[in-house]
């Protein structure tokens, strides 16, 4: 059986399993999900119910949730109802501090994808304590509403801005994107051990590292090298670029639907809308697939 036929067979099987009923999906997070500093932020916001409502400019977020939704449509999945609750610069502990925001998310979702602050603790970078406690609290919240909910933790990527500049501070200064990604992922693995009701980790940080290690992406946007490679970060070397958010959404797609991200090859319109070439899109799909397989 050819690789293409295997992918198609797996896709059709997952489609038949997923088609039974509509599934509600909540993306709970920050600017690393709504697509800050990239065109992804404004990608098809009409596909997502932004629980924050319109901002002062009358806009709502598209971002990774909208890209994920578009992927499901292009895969023939019309049964995912996608919502987002996203506030920049916040960790999981934040959702318990604003009663009206807590009320918006305290519902029986089928699937929730969520993450803490990118340095684990904004005030104490590298410290896992707050992530561990807040992850357990938020899991109880959602599972009390729906004991069958699938909860996924999005392990964020390494940030060049806290690694390479002379002004950088904290535990990852002068290390590497890969090192930070591994440390953050390890913290989420500890969450999984202490709260095993989580369905899994979306290994975005490890995927960024794999893209670097395989020569697809530049590992240091400050050194003016790697011009032929994609830059996974926006101009601030903190948030994602269109490439980074695209890769994030591919991982969400693979994790939530159970489908091979490579099954989108040749039919995704997202890449063209975000200025990603067919070759780059295919390479990022392969990175997403390989990372998900390695993380099993």
Image: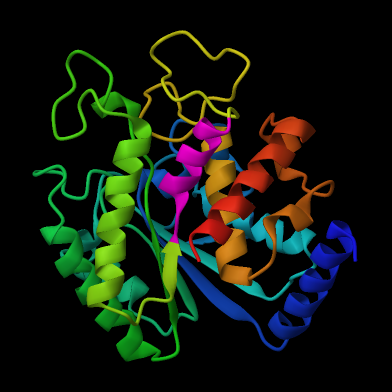
* Residue 45 appears in the picture as rendered: no
* Residue 292 appears in the picture as rendered: yes
**Within the magenta stretch, is there residue 195?**
no
Residue drawn at 40 percent across, 44 percent down: 32
Residue drawn at 50 percent across, 81 percent down: 110
Residue 292's image quarter? bottom right
Residue 77's image quarter? bottom right
Considering the image in quadrants, where does the N terminus appear? bottom right
**In this picture, which residue range is highlighted in magenta?**
202-214
Q: Where is residue 187 in the image (x, y as percent from the top left)?
A: 25, 57
Q: Where is residue 251 in the image (x, y as percent from the top left)?
A: 56, 55
Q: Is 90 situated left or right of 42 in this image?
A: left
Q: Position of residue 151 (x, y in %)?
A: 41, 74
Q: Main secondary structure of the magenta part?
A: helix
Q: Position of residue 157 (x, y in %)?
A: 38, 42
| Colour mapping used in the image | rainbow
Residue 13's image quarter? bottom right
Viewer-closest of 171 and 98: 171
């Amino acid at each position: 059986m050819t690789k293409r036929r295997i992918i198609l067979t797996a896709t059709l099987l997952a489609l038949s399993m997923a088609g039974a009923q509509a599934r509600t999906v909540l993306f709970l997070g920050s600017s690393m999900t709504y697509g800050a500093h990239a065109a992804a932020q404004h990608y098809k916001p009409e596909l997502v119910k932004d629980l924050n409502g319109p901002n002062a400019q009358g806009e709502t977020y598209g971002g990774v949730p909208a890209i994920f939704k578009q992927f499901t449509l292009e895969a023939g999945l019309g049964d995912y109802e996608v919502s987002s609750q996203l506030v920049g610069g916040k960790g999981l502990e934040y959702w318990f501090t604003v009663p009206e925001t807590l009320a918006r998310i305290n519902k029986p979702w089928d699937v929730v994808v969520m993450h803490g602050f990118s340095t684990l603790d904004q005030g104490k970078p590298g410290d896992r304590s707050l992530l561990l406690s807040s992850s357990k609290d938020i899991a109880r919240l959602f599972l009390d509403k729906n004991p069958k909910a699938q909860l996924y933790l999005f392990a964020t990527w390494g940030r060049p801005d806290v690694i390479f500049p002379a002004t950088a501070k904290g535990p990852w200064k002068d290390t590497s994107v890969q090192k930070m990604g591994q440390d953050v992922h390890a913290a989420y693995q500890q969450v999984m051990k202490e709260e095993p009701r989580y369905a899994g980790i979306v290994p975005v940080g490890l995927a960024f590292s794999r893209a670097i290690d395989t020569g697809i992406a530049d590992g240091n946007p400050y050194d003016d090298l790697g011009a032929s490679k994609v830059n996974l970060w926006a101009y601030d070397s903190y948030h994602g670029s269109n490439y980074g958010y695209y890769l994030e959404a591919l991982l969400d797609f693979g994790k939530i639907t159970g489908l091979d991200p490579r099954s989108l090859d040749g039919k995704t319109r997202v890449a063209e809308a975000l200025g990603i070439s067919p070759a780059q899109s295919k390479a990022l799909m392969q990175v997403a697939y390989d990372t998900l397989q390695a993380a099993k």
